[in-house]
Amino acid sequence: MGNVITLMEESVLSTHKAEMDTLLTSKGDSQRTQYPYVTGTSVIGIKYKDGILMAADMGGSYGSTIRYKSVERIKQVGKHSLIGASGEISDFQEILKYLDELILHDNMWDDGNSLGPKEVHNYLTRVMYNRRNKFDPLWNSLVIGGVKNGHKYLGSVSMIGVNFEDDHIATGFGNHLARPILREEWREDLSFEEGVKILEKCMRNLLYRDRSAVNKIQIAKITEEGLTVSQPYSLKTFWNFAAFQNPTVGAEGSW
């Protein structure tokens, strides 16, 4: 009997050693999105009188090629929150898996309470920072918004865990091209129609100046009553500006 146990122990140790050897060799290396492949561009979120509005286009770029034009980058999280993502689409799908498990576990308590946007934001800051410390980041910038118990919440977290709250947030190129518009025109008592008008102005500006933007957008609204995401639609544009017709006129050294 002792010999049998010894043989079994040796077999287990041998198997364990083989597994460790595989992990330590180059053949066992596992790399996931060390560099982004299919990416989405800017997401813009604002607070308005009754809740949160969020806008994003539906483009998915493979490198510099806009390969996909029906990628939904705004999703509902639980009863009180929504999330929008810039960056790697597959990593965003992984994040949505994490959030599905989080909400399922929360529902299993069946205690009459549910996670709000602040809790979801705190959870994602830990996830993003944890993956950053493993040198295997989730290549996304996230916008999380929602309303719970009358409190409006809007926050952001980057791929390395940098996070903050604000009255209006933009990721990607929107952080440079949309935030100036938001700083000038946003106010706390915006109506739904005024908020949509500002978001469309920002998205139009990005469409003109961001090569990865596409003219197919969605706007999501979340209030105490619930969440709605608009059907995709296109913005009216005007391309006959003089600067668009001849962008190099007057430029030093141009042909």
Image (cartoon, helix red, strand yellow):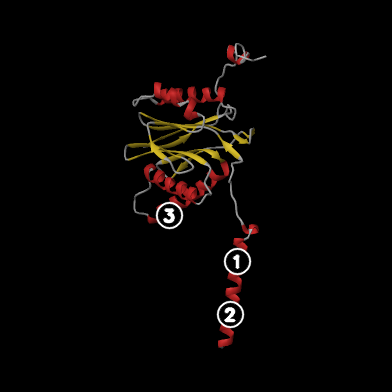
Between the residue at mark 1 and the residue at mark 2, the CA separation in whole angstroms equals 17 Å
Q: Which residue is mark 3?
A: 105
Between the residue at mark 3 and the residue at mark 1, the CA separation in whole angstroms equals 32 Å
Instruction: Report x, y in % for residue 115.
Output: 38, 47
Q: Which picture quadrant has residue 217?
A: top right
Q: Secondary structure at mark 1?
A: helix
Going by the numbered disc 2, the residue's amino acid type is Met
The quadrant of the image that shows the C terminus is: top right
Whether residue 93 is situated above or below residue 111 in the rendered picture: above
Q: Nearer the viewer, residue 147 or 205?
A: 205
Q: Which residue is mark 1?
A: 19
Asked if residue 219 lies left or right of residue 191, the reply is right
Q: Nearer the viewer, mark 3 or mark 2?
A: 2
Instruction: Report x, y in % for residue 193.
Output: 42, 23
Residue 243: mark in rendering: none
Q: Nearer the viewer, residue 101 or 39?
A: 39
Going by the numbered disc 3, the residue's amino acid type is His
Q: Secondary structure at mark 3?
A: helix
Q: Secondary structure at mark 2?
A: helix
Q: Are marks 1 and 2 in contact (CB under 8 Å)?
A: no
**In terms of sequence position, does the residue under pointer 3 or pointer 1 come before the other?**
1
Residue at 34%, 49% in the rendered image = 113
Crowding near pointer 1: few (<14 within 10 Å), some, many (20+)? few
Q: Are marks 3 and 1 in contact (CB under 8 Å)?
A: no
Q: Which residue is mark 2?
A: 8
